[in-house]
């Protein structure tokens, strides 16, 4: 009886450990990769300078992989758009009107 109880507890412990490992793997698979996306920019375009303090984009392009979440760069738009490194498109829910 004691041996059966130990076997049962050991089986439960192994199942719980395997379940937690599977959950961690699932979360890693669901997490989207970081990519460069355009921000909304200004409501009105015109001859205006880029937001202060933003480095100029060099090799960054929309849709390309990136490494540092929330990194930004600009220098290509007179509408105040920047590129941002994130795991989702910030314009997907619409831009402010």
Image (cartoon, grey):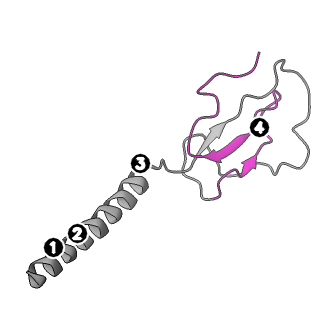
Whether residues under marks 3 and 2 lie with C-beta atoms below 8 angstroms apart, the answer is: no
Query: Magenta segment, which residues?
Result: 68-97
Q: Please indicate whether residue 97 sits to the left or right of residue 28 in the image.
A: right
Secondary structure type for disc 4: loop
Query: Mark 3 vs mark 1: which is more N-terminal?
Result: 1
Which percent across, then down, holds residue 24? 39, 60
Q: Quadrant of the C terminus?
A: top right
The residues bearing labels 1 and 2 have C-alpha atoms spaced at a distance of 6 Å
- Eye-nearest disc, 3 or 1: 1
Residue that label 3 marks: 30
Query: Mark 3 vs mark 4: which is more N-terminal?
Result: 3
Residue that label 2 marks: 12
Q: Residue furthest bottom?
A: 3
Which percent across, then down, holds residue 80? 82, 31
Residue that label 4 marks: 76
Crowdedness near tag 3: few (<14), some (14–19) or many (≥20) residues, C-alpha within 10 Å: few
The one of 7 and 45 positioned closer to us in this rendering: 7
At x 68%, y 44%, the residue is 84
Query: Mark 3 vs mark 2: which is more N-terminal?
Result: 2
- Eye-nearest disc, 2 or 4: 2
Secondary structure type for disc 2: helix
Whether residues under marks 2 and 4 lie with C-beta atoms below 8 angstroms apart, the answer is: no
The residues bearing labels 2 and 4 have C-alpha atoms spaced at a distance of 58 Å
The residues bearing labels 3 and 4 have C-alpha atoms spaced at a distance of 32 Å
Q: Is residue 69 magenta?
A: yes
At x 34%, y 65%, the residue is 21
């Amino acid at each position: 009886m004691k041996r059966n109880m130990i076997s049962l507890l050991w089986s439960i412990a192994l199942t719980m450990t395997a379940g937690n490992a599977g959950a961690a793997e699932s979360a890693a698979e669901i997490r989207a990769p970081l990519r460069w996306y355009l921000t909304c920019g200004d409501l009105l375009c015109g001859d205006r300078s880029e937001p202060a303090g933003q480095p100029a984009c060099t090799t960054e392009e929309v849709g390309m992989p990136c490494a540092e979440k929330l990194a930004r760069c600009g220098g290509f738009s007179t509408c105040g758009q920047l590129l941002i490194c994130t795991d989702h498109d910030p314009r997907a829910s619409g831009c402010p009107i």
